[in-house]
Image (cartoon, rainbow, N blue to C red):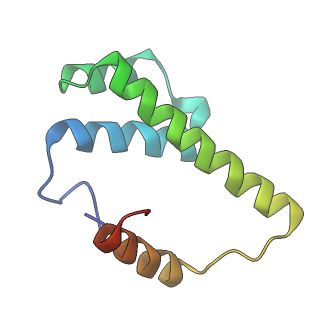
Amino acid sequence: MLADYRTASIDERLRATLAFLEKMTLTPDALGPEDARRVRDAGVSDEALWDAVHVAVAFNTITRIADGLGFAIPTAAQFRSMAKMLLRIGYD
């Protein structure tokens, strides 16, 4: 899934949610009601989509603040390594 959520063996609800969040993050001006409808049609509740949006907004905001203030940002390889570690041990 970390390599490509589009082809990963994951639930279609998660795939639809990730596609929505990707579009929201990368091309927000192109995001519209039809995108939310696609997620709902995949079986995602409004509450679940709203939760996912809040998490993404928090991460996107932190990233933009870090970029604006010149924080040292891990490389893509470091992010992948950290993601694998978090999948293994969780956030505790």
Seen as rendered, the residue at the extreme right is 69
The answer to whether residue 70 is left or right of residue 86 is right
The residue positioned 14% from the left and 44% from the top of the image is: 11
In the image, residue 19 lies at what x, y percent?
A: 35, 42
Give above or below for 90 relative to 50. below
Say which residue appears at 27% left-offset and 57% top-offset. 5
Where's the C terminus, which quadrant? bottom left
Name the residue nearer the viewer: 10 or 51.
51
Q: Position of residue 14 (x, y in %)?
A: 25, 42
Where in the figure is residue 9, as x and y percent of width and height?
Answer: 11, 57
Query: Which residue is situated farthest in the front direction here?
Result: 92
Is 86 located above or below residue 17 in the figure?
below
Task: Indicate the quadrant where residue 34 lies.
Answer: top left
- Total marks shown come to 0
Q: Quadrant of residue 6?
A: bottom left
**Is residue 32 left or right of 74 when viewed as pictured?**
left
Residue in the foreground of this view, choosing between 87 and 75: 87
Which residue is located at x 25 percent, y 44 percent? 15
- Where, quadrant-wise, is the N terminus in this rendering? bottom left
Q: Position of residue 69 (x, y in %)?
A: 88, 63
Give 58 or 5, whichever is nearer the viewer: 58
